[in-house]
Each structure stands twice: as structure tokens, then as C-alpha cells.
Image: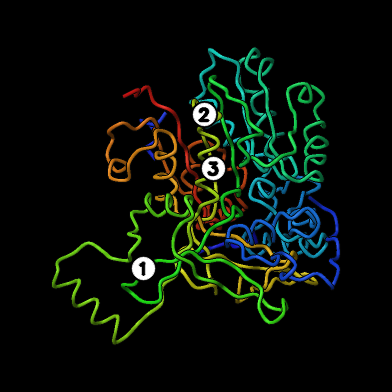
Amino acid sequence: MAARLASSSKRLSSFLISSKVTPFSRAYSSTNIVGESPILVRDFIHSALYDPEHGYFSQRSGSVGQLDRSIKFNQLQGRKAYMKYLDAIYKRSDISWFTPVELFKPWYAHGIAEAIMRTANFSVPLKIYEIGGGSGTCAKGVMDYIKLNAPTRVYDNMTYVSVEISPTLAKKQLETVGEVDSHLAKFSVECRDAADPNEWGHEEQPCWVIMLEVLDNLPHDLIYSKDQVSSWMEVWVQKIRDGQELSELYKPLEDPLIMSCMEILDISKDGSTRGSMAGSFAKNIWAKIFPSPRKCWLPTGSLKLLQVLHGALPKMSLIASDFSYLPDVRIPGERAPLVSSKKDGKSSDLNNYLDAKGEADIFFPTDFWLLERIDHHCSVKLKPRDISSKKGKKRRTLTLDTSSFMEEFGLPTKTRTKDGYNPMLDDFKNTKFYLSVPTHNTK
């Protein structure tokens, strides 16, 4: 989740952490993640990121930082002054990166709270779940805003539940939110994996789910085809050379989660594409003369999480923010990740995801078009051909650039410098917000 700032709406009217990095044992390597039997790519990624002993997030509690105080943007001259200020913060803290909600606190979280207030059903107590809440900055900012701007009864009766896989971050969240005494009675942290269906009950009341920079770190699967027309195969990771190296192993498709994701994407298992017989014949000839291997990354982690959330919280409203694209990706394949590590204050990208061994972050761009299809599929188990139509849909969805979202719901003047430059609106061009709320469609 490195800080990739790509510097490069009236539609809404109808829509109603700073500790030093823990050093790793040099004896540990990515081969330790894989046992004697091959594992799916998603399981390799999950272990590389979340293994309790050696996973990136389990060991590096400082991978996501927390600012001591809010940045006074109105006191900075412009972009040059802001970048100089930011560079000094990174060097001083040795943090991998600061999340947008941290850099722009409290204004970023206030925009999210305003979006919730405009669409929430206040006839029932407000309940908010946040998945992967980092240092607790979003939770505190949202609760601060609701306390100041919502009717008193809304704040008094609200509950905010953080679902956090890291014990270190769970503790930090309690400290951050606890800076306001009245918040603590309404706030709780459940230290668990949000994608585990056994950890959820079943809740029929309306609620909100917040996920900021969560989707990019969810495990993905990989499928492979040797050329433009051959059948797709699922990719596994295995040990070779007496267990000293890792390599990919290709097997016929049989994993249900992979096949379900391919179905939602409308990817044919046999590698064929729609078209005329003449066009298919020409493509087959071309593939034999100039074979070109294909790789495609599938967000099976997002699919699994949304299946769990829709099953446990059928009346949830969702607000998610993440990277819509990533620059300078070296890993091959559609929707491929960046694999990035930081040492001595400098970030470096790896050429192979198999080289990730605990000290490297693996993060993916979010295909928001695909996210919407997965969301609809999980909410009513629509067939892929029905997802594009309104038939049977139980969700109302909207995707917005971060700048459009904040201009509508936030206070962008608070993050503007003296010369008019606004990093919250100008720098995060590669991030989007996704909003999804239930409809009254019961057919």
C-alpha cells in the first residue's frame, strides 16, 4: 500500500501508526510460506501479508503511520512546500506510508461521516462497522463529526465496531478513539478476520460498512493461458530445487472461488471469445504462429469478503475507497499488483510476487466496474447476464473520483494551500470511492 500519488456531481442528487519497523530474521524467506504441497496464489499472498509470525502487516505495525497532529494546509504556500513537509515526516518516522484519512485528518473522515448521515436511516440506531481501521483515525473522525452534527439521540445510541486482524492495531485504535471519553462507550474492536464467515452472526438491522484501502490488500488468484486461445488454468505456488526456490504450477480449473469470479467477469473457461467462426479461425491460426501467454489476476479475496458481508449483514450500506490504478507495475497480467518494500527510507518495487517474504507489501488496483458486479452478484446471486440490467438488483451503487466525493460531502477548503493547490483533490487521481446502499427491490 505504498503512497502512489498519481498527479497526473451532480449525479449525487439522485443517489441519496508511528513506531519503528520491526526487523525480520534473515533466515526467513518466501519459501517458508509454502509447505511440501503446492498452494493457491491467494493463499501465498495471504500468508505473505498476514502470517502471525512473519506476515507484512503482523510484524510491521509501523507500515501505516499516524500523524501527531493535523497538517495546517492553509499555512503552506503550495505543492512544493507540502511535498517538503511530507518528505520530512516520512524520513522522521520511517513509515511506509500515511493513508489519506491520516494525511487529511479530520476532514477526510468528516466527508465519510457526512455521506453516511445523508443516507442513513435514523429511525433505527446507527451502527457502523469498519474493516481494517488502521490506527483508528477514521473511527475517531467519523464519531467526532456525528457528535457535533447529528441529532443528539443519533450519537447517544450509535455503535461503532472495528473489525481488525492485527492485535497491535486493535490496541492502537482503542487509544485513538479513547481520546474522547464519550466515544469509548460506543466503540469496540473485534480482533478477527472479517472474511471468516464463522466470526459473524446475522444482523437484519440496517448498518454501514467502511473499508478504506482494504480491497487492495485482499488476496487475489491468478489464472494462466499459454496462448490467446488455449484454456485457462489456475496458478499454484510450489517449491523447487530442494525447497530453495518457488515457481508457478499450472493446474486445470477446479477451484469454486476462481470459477465463480471468472463467471462474474464473463471469462470463458476454454479461453474462447465471442465472435464469428471466421474470426475465431483466424485467431486460432494467429495464436499458433505468434503465441502470447496470458495472465489474469482475479479479486477472489474481495468476492469472498462480500459474500460473507452480504450473508451476515443483508441490509448493509457500503462505502469503500481504494486505488483504481497503479503506476509502474512490473508484475505481468491484467489487474496485476505492485510488490513494494521500503528500506532506509527508500521504496523499491520487486519484479516477482514470489519474492515477497514478509517485508514487502503486495497491493492491487481495484477494478471498480468489477467490484460493482461482484457486489450485485453477492447481494442477490444474480446470473452474470443479469448483472448489467436492473432486473432483480437490490443495490443502488455509485463510483466517484475522490475529488468528486470530497467536493460533494467534504470540506475541501480545509485542505487547500495558499496558492490554491489542494493535495486531497489534486494528488489522489488514482483513487475512487464506491458507495452501495440497499434498495426496496424484493423481486
Q: Report the disc number at residue 316.
A: 2
Residue at left offset 79%, top offset 57%: 60
- Label 2 neighbour load within 10 Å: few <14, some 14-19, many 20+: many
Q: Amino acid at mark 3?
A: Ala
Q: Report the disc number at residue 271.
A: none
Residue nearer the viewer, 77 or 369: 369
Q: How far from the left and from the top, in percent, is residue 409?
A: 51, 36
What is the tally of numbered marks visible in this picture? 3
Residue at left offset 17%, top offset 72%: 279
Q: Is residue 106 visible?
A: yes
Residue nearer the viewer, 106 or 134: 134
Q: Earlier in the sequence, mark 1 or mark 2?
A: 1
Give left or right: position of 80 versus 307: right
Q: Quadrant of the N terminus?
A: bottom right
Q: Element at badge 1? A: loop
Give left or right: position of 253 versus 19: left
Q: Element at badge 2? A: strand
Q: How far from the left and from the top, in percent, is residue 229?
A: 31, 72
Q: In the current view of this chain or complex, which residue is farthest to the bottom?
A: 289
Residue highlighted by disc 1 = 231
Give left or right: position of 394 versus 247: left
Q: Amino acid at mark 2?
A: Met
Residue 441, quarter of picture: top left
Q: Report the disc number at residue 320.
A: 3
Q: In the current view of this chain or complex, which residue is farthest to the front?
A: 36
- Label 1 neighbour load within 10 Å: few <14, some 14-19, many 20+: some
Cβ atoms at labels 2 and 3 below 8 Å apart: no
Q: Earlier in the sequence, mark 1 or mark 3?
A: 1
Q: Is residue 328 visible?
A: no
Q: How far from the left and from the top, in percent, is residue 175?
A: 83, 36
